[in-house]
Structures are given as C-alpha cells and as structure tokens.
Image (tube, rainbow, N blue to C red):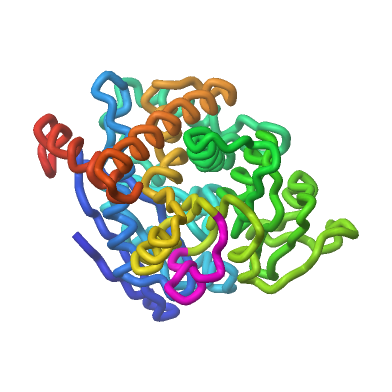
Amino acid sequence: MSITWTDHVTGRRGYLVIDRLVRGVSSGGLRMRAGCTLEEVTGLARGMTMKEALHYDPQARYIPLGGAKGGIDCDPQDPDAYGVLVRYLRAMRPYIENFWTTGEDLGLSQDIVDRAAAEAGLVSSIQAVYPLLDDEGAARQRLADAFAVDVDGIGLDELAGGCGVAEAALAALDRAGVPYAGSRVSVQGLGTMGGATARFLAQAGLRIVAVADVKGTIANPDGLDIEALLAARDAFGAVDRTALRPGDAELPGEAWLEADAEVLVPAAVSYCVNTANQRRITARWIVEAANMPVLPEAEELLAARGVTVLPDVVVNSGTNAWWWWTLFGDIDPDADEALAHIRRSMRSLIGQMLARAEADGSTPRAAAHAIVADRLPEITDRFGWHR
C-alpha cells in the first residue's frame, strides 16, 4: 500500500509505503529530506521487510513485524519543517494508530518525532504494536528506561545502530584475517549512525582518517580525535571547525570517498555512490550504515574491482531490532546487555551472509536476499500475509 500526501499549507509532499504486515503491524522509520520520492520510500519499505525477517528467531519474544517506511520531501532545517511534520503525522494518524510503527530516520531525531506525534494527537509513534505486548505498561516503561540510558555522553538509543554497523565491519575484518590496529576508516556523516559507528571502531583500535559532514570532509592520515569531533557536533551532525587540531585538514565534501582507507562507511544519504564516483574508491570494504547509499550499477562495478559491499539491510538493522528486543523483553534497559546482544546478533548475521555468499559465489547483498527468501515463507506460514 502506498500513499502520497500533499501538505495543504506548503504544498510539500509526503509518502507512506507499507510493504508487508505481520500480525497486522509494520515497522519502519520516517525520514525527512529535500528530494525524497515515493520510489525511494518504496525501496526503503521493502528493505524494512528484509531487516525484520533477518532477525526472526522463533524462540524470541520479539516476533518481527512487516516492513514500512515514511518520507517527507522537505529540508529538515527549513523553518516550515516542523509544521509539515506535525501535519504529516496528523494525516497519517489512522495508520500509525493501527498498522505502522515508526521513529527517527534521516533528517529527524526521535525527540522531534515524539514531540510532533504528541502535537498530532498520537499516544506514541509505535502505538500500533501495543496490542501485541503481553504487558503494555511494563514494556513501555522498559523502552522509556532504555532511552534514558546514557553512555559517556551519548544516549543508548543513538549508540545501538552504530554498534551494529561497527560490529559488521569488525566481523568482516576478522573473517579476512585483517588486524584492527592499523586499519583505516572513512565515514560519511557524523550524525546518529555515523558518529556512533566511528566511536565504536575507534574504541576497537581502528584509525578514523576521514569524516564528512554537510560542510565538507575532515581528514588526518594519523587519525582524527573522534571524541572531540563528536563533542563539537550540532543537532544535524555538522562539526564546529574550531575543534580541529593542527594536523586536521579540511577537504571537499566527496573527499571521503577516495580516502586511503580499508573501510568506507557511508552513513548519511542514499544514492551517494554512483557509477562515476565509484572509480575513486580504493577501500576494500564498503559498510552501508545509511539506507541504499550504493547504487546497484555502482555495486556491480565495485564487485568487479574486488570491493565488497556489506549491505544496509543487514548492517544498519541494529537500531530497529534493539527497539523491539527491548520493548518485547528479550533484553533489559541496560547498556552492557543491549550492546552485547547487538554484537552477537550482528556477528551471526554477517557470518551467515558471508558464508552464503562464498558458497553461492554471489555478493553479500544477494546472499542476504537469499536468507530472507528462506525465512519469509516460515514467517508467512506462521502469521499469514496480512493478519
């Protein structure tokens, strides 16, 4: 099901696509960016179905939901953006109340989504899932407690996705026998996902040699001070350049692509790696923290050059899964337990995907799709398509 909405005040458009319902409910974030299209949201909704299926464990309390996605064609820094968001959520209220659970995505923080949802008359942006809970009150309190957890100045909700992305990269390095020490990383985007990913990789001993934000690329071949850059971010992930050290260079925006690094982490926008600029990439791995950052045609060319793309449907699925593991009670609102659970799950998924790719002679993305194709019939047999 797809819906196109037009804001009666500004004329801006918004979209909702529900790809699949499981037990009558779907899951997928809401993004806001200038140029967002129905085609983009449709692809993201399909990806959410895959992410949910990849985390299916018949023994767990969390039963994966269907996939969905929302999108608004508006610059989140536009003065009209918040009003557009409130009106969009008000228009989508029947779907959010009954079928679609949503939350932060590109351009929106959970705090802003929560505030706008309340103004739109919603109980919660995830209220459609409440009827599936054994004890709604306890579950909601557990999730609220988890969102209140802070780890060295960053909320656990912001760390969950980046922990999964970092673990995906580390698992790939381990499988290839590449030591962490001396391995270099370039990250596009220092927002929620990119910032947390950079932190975890730096803590593991990798050297972050470049990060890109809306102002350009910051690079240092000897390694950047990630904690200082994280502390100097604004709400949109832009770094205050006064925090740079003497050895840090300011380069053009796309310089992160050609950084002398083993690992590239696109963690900002979709469609940023295309057939033209993929030639500039010398990294061995691209770890997709953002949704759909590498165009399919570019991925084919990269694979032919020996560059491995670890796909978004696996790599950035940690945030979504963490929400549901916490809400359904598979984990407690504790940072150590949550991050350990994310690491175990991501290790398992990356291992299965790369082993399948090797056995099939395919790309990791094709292998991930094959794993989903194996799991969806089991979910369908158990819960049906739309109930």
Residue drawn at x 40%, y 50% is 311
Work out which quarter of the rendered image holds the C terminus and state it: top left
Residue placed at 50% from the left, 63% from the top?
A: 269
Looking at this view, name the residue that lies furthest to the right: 246
Quadrant of the image occupied by residue 152: top right
Please state the total of marks drawn on the protein image. Answer: 0
Q: Position of residue 380 (x, y in %)?
A: 12, 37
Magenta highlight: main SS: loop
Residue most extreme to the bottom = 11
Kindly identify the residue that appears in the image at 52 percent across and 65 percent down: 82
Residue 294 in percent (x, y) is at: 43, 63
Looking at the picture, how far across and down is residue 274, in whole percent?
44, 71
Which of the pair 9/261 is nearer the observer?
261
Queried whether the magenta region covers residue 114, the answer comes back as no
Question: Can you say whether 76 is above or below 315 in the image?
Answer: below
282 sits left or right of 52 in the view: right
Q: Is 107 situated above or below 280?
A: above
Q: Does the magenta portion include 272?
A: yes
Q: Could you tell me if residue 27 is visible in this image?
A: yes
Quadrant showing the N terminus: bottom left
Task: Residue 162 in the image: state x and y as whole percent.
Answer: 55, 42
Q: Is residue 246 left or right of residue 383?
A: right
Q: Which residues are magenta?
A: 270-283
Identified at 32% across, 41% down, the residue is 358
Q: Is residue 52 visible?
A: no
* Of 149 and 262, the residue lying toward us: 262
